[in-house]
Amino acid sequence: MPDIDPDLLSIQEARSLAAAAHAAQKQFLHASQAEVDRICQAMAEAGFAAAERLGRLAAEETGYGVPEHKTLKNILSSKLLWQAIKDIPTVGVVRHDAGKKVYDIAWPMGVIAALIPSTNPTSTTLYKILISVKARNGIVVAPHPAAVKCSAEAARVMAEAGERAGMPKGLVGCMTRISLPGTQELMKHKYTALILATGGSEMVRAAHSVGKPAYGVGPGNVPVYVDRSADLKQAAKYIVASKAFDHSVICATEQAVVADKPIAAQLEELMKAEGAYFVNDEQAGALARLLFPSGPLINPRMVGKSPQQLAQACGISVPATARILVARLKNVGHSEPLSGEKLTTVLGWYEADGWEAGCERCIELINYGGRGHSLVIHSQDDKVTMHFGLEKPVFRILVNTFGTLGATGYTTGVMPAMTLGPGGVGGAMTGDNITVQHLYNIKRLAYEITPPPEAALAPGSTDDPAQLGGQGRAGSAPTPVGAQADQIEEIVRRVLAELRK
């Protein structure tokens, strides 16, 4: 018997999983809020219990990042996420405006196609399953080819825990035969109601191109502005730790410092004390050639690497104590490759004299590949902070905190999420942190509160010739109704003939 084409196997798997999720979701549609929450709590607890093991599996399979940091992301996407969403109603009447006599009724999307990146595979899988099931959807996970085993294991942990708690079998599925045609089949499948895409620009564009509703996220070229009023010691500690976190694979990681000129030298020394190694121009050039050999997209083999691994790959020498590498840059754009998003432990460095100049430099960086995403500011001056909040074309402005942990909701009050919307300016449907409320629609039951006007209730006049089939022009005879029908029939016949050509 000849071998079956792997693409065909992938396509068939996508179809089978989508059909199973659809059948299970029709059954789950009748679950009570208590049943939904019992299932989700069981899955969150299982994800939390497996957080360390899944973090290790992700690092081993992909070669990206730091296992301990991936564990923290798994905790965010299970325990902390559940704490944030557990009290959100998702079944039946979720809001009632007594004054307007309107009831809001939650209605799930159906089956969610969840595209998973290789940079944060297990945490994104846990997160998407939890918010999808909380909203009473089915979900089929489509892992990145470089992270199939760890993503599938995360999905298995969640599915088995949910099914033990009463979730219909098949509601949570995960592809294991990964191919581009298979993932496309999942996205286009008749039972797929919505695509939840996290990953590179090409993946997000593909998700938006199949004719289905899609939540996608673009790149995050996140600047961090350090004002002269900032707590410099804390700023230095946070910037270095955030950039080093999981070797910088989170899209909200700081990509370039913009230092206020009067405090730039002091900030540099404080960052050096935290493990930042400032490379010289020659070393920066070597890093640029290594990371961006053929354009603005980073070399995928260099994503999520330590400074020492990067140094070895491009033939330069850095200290064993270096946690991140910092390159002094002059310009922003294609002529300065390191001014773009660097999903690895390399950070740009700019100086600007005053917050207005810093503001302009940050906007340049955002416009070069990070529109709509995030910005970090370290400042004790509320006026400066508010100017940044009002003027930057991003939807997360993080104040005096980590970029990585602040944007994802670990250290701030924003919703815990691994999919961060860049809004319309970034080519997405929303600028929110995607969560459970984005995964159901609202039906509205509305009672009359204002009687209709009398004119709407009164019968219309029958004296107007137009009401009798006439053309309504003074002095012209009305067109007989039968003649009008003949004319309409002739027009329809001509249109159909044109369409058949």
Image (spheres, grey):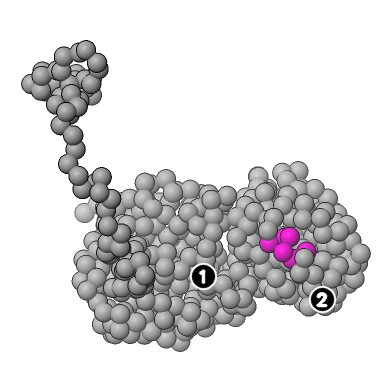
Mark 1: give few (<14), some (14-19) or many (20+) Cα within 10 Å.
many
Q: Amino acid at mark 1?
A: Ala
Quadrant in which the N terminus appears: bottom left
Quadrant in which the C terminus appears: top left
| Depth order, front residue of 409/229 | 229
Distance of mark 1 from mark 2, alpha carbons?
28 Å
Q: Amino acid at mark 2?
A: Asp
Q: What residue is shown with label 2? A: 231
Residue 162 image position (x, y, % from top left):
32, 80
| Depth order, front residue of 478/201 | 478
Q: Please give the name of the residue rendered at 51% of the width and 70% of the height, measured from the top-left corner.
A: 417
Q: What residue is shown with label 1? A: 417
Give the mark nearest the N terminus, 1 or 2.
2
Mark 2: give few (<14), some (14-19) or many (20+) Cα within 10 Å.
some
Q: Between label 1 and label 2, give the one nearer the viewer.
A: 2
Q: Can residue 25 be seen by looking at this rendering?
A: yes
Is 128 drawn above or below residue 472 in the view shown?
Answer: below
| Label of residue 428 in the image | none
- Residue extent of the magenta highlight: 384-389
- SS for dot 1: loop
